[in-house]
Amino acid sequence: MGQPLYTIKNDWIPVKMQLKTSKTEITHIFIAWLAISVAFTIVLSRWYHQSMVSIFIISAVTVGFAFILHELAHKVVAQKYGAWSEFRMAPFMLLVAIVTAFMGFIFAAPGAVMISAPYLTKEESGKIAVAGPMMNVALAFAFLPLTFCSGMTEQIGDFGVMINAWLAAFNMIPVSVLDGKKVFAWDRRVYGAALSIVIIVLVMSMVI
């Protein structure tokens, strides 16, 4: 993969960038999705007395979508602002996720979207950051109708709502490298509105 081409933005020239990817990014997404799904399969096998194949499907559809689409939401918005952005897995952290899964819990940080641009405003950085948690909110509502079904479909719905609600809530904490810090730094009113939505979804996940 060669050096990325960056688009320089200024006040006079509008920047438009189509969504772009690479074979490297697709490979990293697939490996991260597979690894995180395996890790959660190991943990969920303690809760669900089903075949490992069934549990893997539940994990891949729920956790896989939650983590990967969260990161890709950052990518889409970043490219909208003319930035080079691609997902890169964190091999060591994927290994940590699988190892900790055998201990009964998961420390999951499968990777992140790498973003490079000559200049991003505080507003642009905030919008890129809030896209991740809002994607999880959207996914939680997408999984909600499945909770009224039965069998594996209901399990996918229940876990899909829960994992997306908690992932959104965790990332909205305004500390360290979490999304919430950038959103809070950009606009406290937007942060408050986004956090309120996330809290509603989190409460919803606890009562369904």
Image (cartoon, helix red, strand yellow):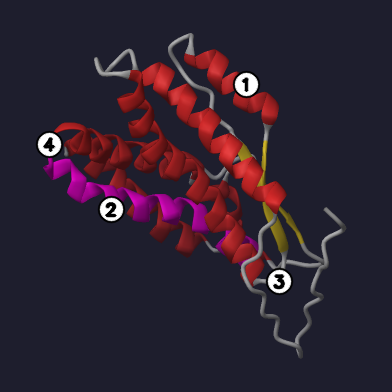
Residue denoted by label 3: 82
SS type, badge 2: helix
Residue found at the very far top of the displayed protein: 103
Q: Nearer the viewer, residue 6 or 151?
A: 151
Sequence order check, earlier mark of 1 and 4: 1
Tell me how far mark 1 sits from mark 4, CA to CA: 34 Å
Tell me how far mark 2 sits from mark 4, CA to CA: 18 Å
Q: Are marks 3 and 2 in contact (CB under 8 Å)?
A: no
Q: Position of residue 132 (x, y in %)?
A: 50, 53
Q: Nearer the viewer, residue 202 or 69?
A: 69
- For the point 69% across and 51% down, the residue is 23
Tell me how far mark 3 sits from mark 4, CA to CA: 45 Å
Residue type beneath disc 2: Phe
Sequence order check, earlier mark of 1 and 3: 3
Instruction: Give the label on residue 95, or none.
Output: 1
Q: Going by the image, does 147 lie left or right of 161?
A: left
Residue type beneath disc 4: Ser
Sequence order check, earlier mark of 2 and 4: 2
Can residue 101 be seen from the camera position used here? Answer: yes
- For the point 53% across and 57% down, the residue is 73
Sequence order check, earlier mark of 3 and 2: 3
Instruction: Give the label on residue 141, or none.
Output: 2
Sequence order check, earlier mark of 3 and 4: 3
Can residue 200 be seen from the camera position used here? Answer: no
Q: Is residue 41 above or below residue 23?
A: above
The region drawn magenta spans 123-149
SS type, badge 1: helix
Residue denoted by label 4: 150
Residue type beneath disc 3: Gly
Sequence order check, earlier mark of 2 and 1: 1
Residue type beneath disc 1: Leu
SS type, badge 3: loop
